[in-house]
Amino acid sequence: MLQYRVNDWITLRETISFQYAGTKEKRFLPYNAIGADWLDWQINKAEEGNSLNQSIQTETQLSFGSPFKNKNHELSGAITWQTDKSGYEWMNIQSNKIPSTDIQDPAIDAAINWIGTGSGENRLVSGKANVNYKFLDKYMIQGNLSEDAHSSFGNNNRWGTFYGLFVGWRFSSEPFMKSITWLGESMIRASYGVSGRQPSDVYARFATYESTGKGAYILNPAIAPTSIQLNNLRWETISSWDIGGELSLFNDRLYIEGDIYNKVSTDILFDKYKIPFSSGYAELKFLNAGEMTNYGWELMADGKAFKTKDWLLSFNLNVSQNINSFSKLPENFNTERSVSIGNQEYPRRVVEGEPIGSFFGFRYLGVYASDEDVIARDAEGNTLYDAEGKVVPMKYTDTYVFKGGDPIYEDINKDGKIDINDVVYIGDSNPNFIGGFGTTLKYKNWDFSMSFHYRLGFDIINGIAMQTQGMNNKDNQSKAVLNRWRVQGQQEEGLLPRAYMYHPANNLGSDRYVEKGDYMRLNNIKLSYMLSNAMCQKLGVRKANIAVSARKLYTWTGYSGQDPEIGQEASDPFWIGVDYARTPPPKVITFSIGIGF
């Protein structure tokens, strides 16, 4: 970095950063490591790969400080020009069924399993300007402007303009507030800004063509288009405002901070957007369309309940709520990704105004006690009869008549048939509240702290229960199936449907597997001791600390699955929270010693 001070309030800085990384790797998998037969494709598999990654970033900045002699005014800012260029190259070759474990080079005369190479570049240029002004250390205003260009866009929309404005008022410094002795440094603030997001794939805008292989066109290989050229891709734009405040009370014994916010994303970049096959393609790599809204609030508090020379007891808590929804769907948007209502499947829908992560499925009402109970009824509860005066039995679509021991699904439209028309809203993956709380206790050189994390008011589809309680295939089942229907007339609380190999409707996507996911987790606990100066001198060190800590020791929840903390994928409009019992977060206990010389 080079720095040149033009005068007392103007400074020029030039920063250049260069990174270069090359990797070469070889691997060999001998036949006796996997115990497979000689026809397996992984027998004596050799692989070699080379990769090269490089990047260079530059930043030219002209910054200025306050030129005012009057101390009541403070002005600062900067004009910055940034560039970022990165590139990569790679190659990989894999061979298998090499005749000897002594030969481990994939380039020898063996079966080529795969060979490939690739390269790419990514470029970003950005011009930024920001200015900060403060008057009497009470009134603050900040502004910024950015012009960005990214190589993932074509010439039509390569540049994006983004900006922000912040205003703040430190009202605790006003003369009329001086009489309030319990009020410390406090302020209210507001901000508005527009930011952008570019596609994750820098080459998505290019049309691509691939060799389709022998026989694709009569008996000859052919070149065919595989993706559409996207000349008009635009920046996804996020407009947001925030209003908040900070309060310091009772000689800094209590600190409170709160915000309310609203974010509107327009020209959303839908990744792998499905389009009709009649177009000649299955999907667009990206599509700019639609509008999504996120709004909510956050509250944080930190208090010192007890403080003396030797003791400190403090508490902290935070809570937030975020609500998201598609306020505008793309034109001709297919609001249903899947209308399948088979076993273990939930229809995927997007409803304008509803949050991402909403569940849709059947309402599960229990188990038919006997064949005589399988009767279709109208809205008033009266039995339905056909044209010949016979009782109409409940059916699954037009393919199966329910029997005793089968699950009961609510017939929403009272037509005597369970089908897509009976699918309703049954839950929401989004928590109503997210937050945490904790405490710290210090006594002389001892320090103890613990913190908790929680999510409240959300639902989970227990995918493992769905897989292990269906009893319609040869997979292992859980012990819960011991409480299943077996004989005509059997009716008990919590009874599961009967076992039936390849039953067409024994395990439909329904609220049978939707559970409350509320939980509170002991996220971190720590006890440490700082050795006294006298002890450190005896040991010949400057300072020393001993600590034991543990993470994610225990979770309180009513959820019956393995872990209620399901990751959210808000970028996918059809995402729903299904738990397939991925490895839960491990309990980690750490003992550490820190020594300074």
Image (cartoon, rainbow, N blue to C red):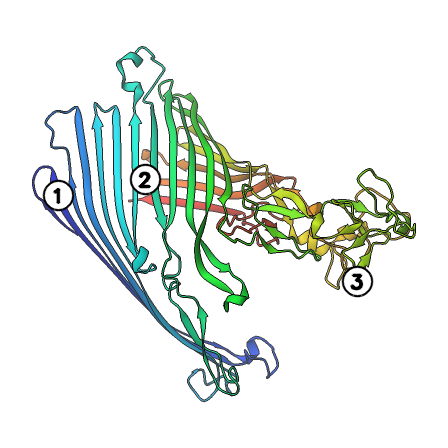
Q: Foreground: 470 or 107?
A: 470
| Labels 2 and 1: the sequence-earlier one | 1
Q: Residue at x 35, y 19 (%)?
A: 251
| Labels 2 and 3: the sequence-earlier one | 3
Residue positioned most to the front: 387
- x and y, in percent, of residue 55 in the image: 27, 61
Q: Confirm or deny contact between disc 1 and disc 3 (CB under 8 A).
A: no
- x and y, in percent, of residue 279 in the image: 50, 66
Q: Residue at x 12, y 43 (%)?
A: 11
Against 32, residue 507 (above or below) is above
Graded by Cα atoms within 10 Å as few (under 14), some (14 to 19) or many (20 or more), the crowding at tag 3 reads few
Q: Which mark is residue 11?
A: 1
Check disc 1 and report its element: helix, strand or loop. strand
Q: How many marks?
A: 3
Residue 217 visible (yes or no): yes
Of badges 2 and 1, nearer the viewer stands 1
- x and y, in percent, of residue 150 in the image: 30, 57
Residue type at mark 1 is Thr
The Cα–Cα distance between marks 2 and 1, rounded to whole angstroms, is: 40 Å
Against 471, residue 427 (above or below) is above
Residue type at mark 3 is Met
Quadrant holding the C terminus: top left
The residue pinned by badge 2 equals: 543
Q: Foreground: 387 or 511?
A: 387
Question: Does residue 112 appear to the left or right of 582 in the view shown?
Answer: left
The Cα–Cα distance between marks 1 and 3, rounded to whole angstroms, is: 78 Å
Residue positioned most to the left: 7
Check disc 2 and report its element: helix, strand or loop. strand
The residue pinned by badge 3 equals: 501
